[in-house]
Image: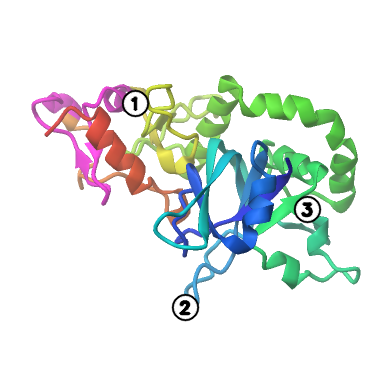
Amino acid sequence: MAKAVFTTKIRPSYDDLPEQRYHFPATYLNQAEAAVGDWVVYYEPRRQDAGPSGREGRQAYFATARVRSIVPDSSLSGHYYALVSDFLEFDHPVPFRLGETTVERALTKPDGSTNKGAFGRAVRLLEEHEYQLILRLGFTQTQPETAEWQVASLVAESAEYERPIIEQLVSRPFRDAAFAKVVQQAYDARCALTGLRLINGGGRCEIEAAHIRPVGDDHNGPDSVRNGLALSRTMHWLFDRGLVSARDDFTILAPHKLIPESVRGMVNHDGRLIVPDDPALRPHPVFLRYHRERIYKGD
């Protein structure tokens, strides 16, 4: 087994849904197979397509997941899927370069420039200490504007933290806290259904993070910002019980027969969810569709 990096775009060329599967050509089969049973990090490149507006990618590591198996793509010869579980978004993206140091040492040439050949590979094996470093930076409370000496210190210490970090990745309290933080940040502590921004007197966010596809054993939803909505406590309760939902275009579904008029009056007047400006953080249609088909009690 080995750690690895999976590169994916906001608008992927392949049939990627990082929360569930990663699609890749046979070129990367050996590297992907080496990661079966182990953990990977997802990397989002800067360039998303060949057009002039295609440079909106974050150029950062943004999540981790465990590779369960590799299966062939039955509809496209020479292509495969890496099926994953335990997907978890970082508190904030981790840049591939921190000052003069790249997290992946193989991406830096002796002269300090980027090794474009290595960087261009969509699937790359990752050293254990590099994986630990990415996780420690991705799950900190401060932005990763870390000086080189601090990065070097983290690398040197990473072996001591291997077991606790892996244990945290599968711990429900840790996952809930990380999920809540990334959703609250994406929505600027504002309820997607009402527009209310709730911050208490101590500066703490009172908006809750709701899973669109629930995470329980019956549903197995991922801890992804794209599977999340920032909601007030009342709206969270209504959403979880299927009394409100949303279409793929973010139109709110709040039927009269399920929602009292006094509550309907709180919903955004334009009838649409408030969603993040960044397309990478918006609810994914796959999860919205699941909620409508499996959770929602309306027509």
Using the rendered image of the protein, determine whether residue 147 is visible from the camera's viewpoint: yes
Report if residue 104 lies within the magenta region. no
Where residue 208 appears, as percent x and y from the top left, is 43, 28
Q: Amino acid at mark 2?
A: Gly
**Which mark is first along the chain, 3 or 2?**
2
Q: Amino acid at mark 3?
A: Val
Report if residue 248 lies within the magenta region. yes
Choose mark 1 or mark 2, whichever is in front.
2
Residue under pointer 3: 103
Residue 51 got which mark?
A: 2
Residue at position x 62%, y 56% in the image: 29
Residue under pointer 1: 236
Q: How many neighbours does mark 1 have within 10 angstroms: few (below 14), some (14-19), or many (20 or more)?
A: many
- Where disc 2 sits, the SS reads loop
Q: How many neighbours does mark 3 have within 10 angstroms: few (below 14), some (14-19), or many (20 or more)?
A: many
Q: Are marks 1 and 3 in contact (CB under 8 Å)?
A: no
**Which mark is first along the chain, 2 or 1?**
2
